[in-house]
Amino acid sequence: MPNTILVGAQWGDEGKGKVIDVLTAQSDVIVRFQGGSNAGHTVIADGKKYVLHLIPSGILHAGKQCVIGNGVVMDPFDLITEIGILRAEGIEIDGRLLISDRTHMVMRWHRALDAADEARRCEKTKIGTTGRGIGPAYGAKMGRTGLRVGDMLSPHFLDAVRGQSDAANEILASWGAPVLDVDEMVKVYRQAAETLKPYIADTVAYINEADRKGKSILLEGAQGTMLDIDFGTYPFVTSSNPTSGGACTGSGLSPRRIDRVVGVIKCYTTRVGSGPFPTELKDETGEHLRQKGGEFGATTGRPRRCGWFDAVVGRYSAMVNGVDFWAMTKLDVLDEQPVIKICTAYLRDDGVRYESFPADTSVLDRCVPVYEEMPGWMQPTSKITRYEDLPLKARVYVERLVELIGGRLGILSVGPARETTLRTGL
Ligand code: IMP
């Protein structure tokens, strides 16, 4: 069975949870490779809705092994809460969940610094983060002061907690933000370390051993390509690499062991937080997509910004990730649109045309999207279970998207239920 990387191709929230759920059935080991509890994967299993932030949704499938990889930044308290919720639902965790000893931790002071940093920025420079401490945790990792999961096993861990919370308090105080109670930090992290010890492992060795034994590994990304720290709309991005390259650095599985890359892409576009969004619709069509698509953040509940499909983004994502197959989601959200637009390029006010996504996103302020229009199918699709049964105009739309962005269609999703995941090649 193949080893698969699954990535989001837009600004996150592409419906990865549902696609992961389908691909999990073909996998033995599911590895989350980046991000933290800024992500929120919504999965409906056996009629119950689960929103998971850190633990791969493979945990909902009996017998599957789940790994939180080294590329993740893990908040111990969020993880403990998530373990508790799953246990209360009768889901077996012990022996099935491993956390890499190399995974960096999001500490309470990272959250406090994230909130305080956003609060002191002006409207124009606010990133609109999820407030989960992601930027400061990855900052500490790159600055070589981070605390890793394996450090919880060290007798010096609590000294480090004391030292680092003291240092963070100095910054917080200088920004006029509330400071943390250092003794309380030591107390709660002592307990957290005790609770999480049984799950800590050398997951790099584990994943590679599983690969050698012929197990099928699914490397699941959070967020999306346009939020990538290198390839996204910098600085309005997250602090990790949600693109396919991040799957290898975030898990320890070699690029040579990857068989295929699946890109998850919505049939329109959304984004949460600040930053450029060329095809954004600030009118009633955008509002319709938001309501019909339930476009509200799984982590923060914030309304998502909505707009037409952007093939410039799709092509760029196909290139950066090396997408073999697309999983296209939420086609049914477009069922009531008489005319559907697709952005094929950006046109600058001086006539320069952008077919590829520019690094300097400030040029987008001077650009308008170049649209082509397609007739809508104006029929419900959310009960259809075979690709051939879709209205002709819906198939023409999907096939045009694939033609514009390259690659092959593997999955098309037309509704939240498992049966509405139409398989066309995966
Ligand atoms: P952070 O990752 O919390 O630092 O937030 C940085 C940017 O990424 C903000 O615009 C967030 O809204 C966005 N972001 C982070 N996680 C997600 C996600 O799972 N879905 C969509 N946007 C996200």
Image: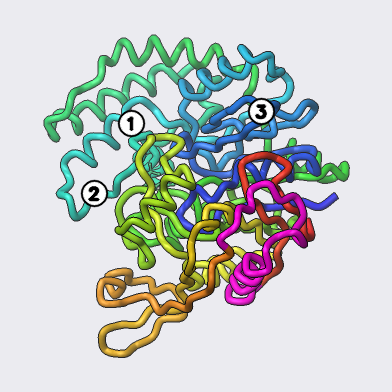
Q: Circle 1 — which element?
A: helix
Residue, disc 2: 126
Q: Residue at x 79, y 60 (%)?
A: 425
From the image, state whether disc 2 or disc 3 is nearer to you.
Answer: 2
Image x and y of residue 371, in percent: 43, 77
Q: Residue at x 31, y 28 (%)?
A: 109
Extent of the magenta region: 378-406
Q: Are marks 2 and 3 in contact (CB under 8 Å)?
A: no
Q: Amino acid at mark 3?
A: Leu
Q: Earlier in the sequence, mark 1 or mark 3?
A: 3
Quadrant holding the C terminus? bottom right
Dot 3: few (<14), some (14–19), or many (≥20) neighbours within 10 Å?
A: many
Q: Is residue 228 visible?
A: no
Q: Is residue 398 magenta?
A: yes
Residue 264 drawn above or below residue 420? below
Specify whether 2 is left or right of 78: right
- Separation of residues labelled 2 and 3 (CA atoms): 35 Å
Q: Is residue 98 magenta?
A: no
Q: Tell me the number on the disc at residue 111.
A: 1
Residue, disc 3: 98
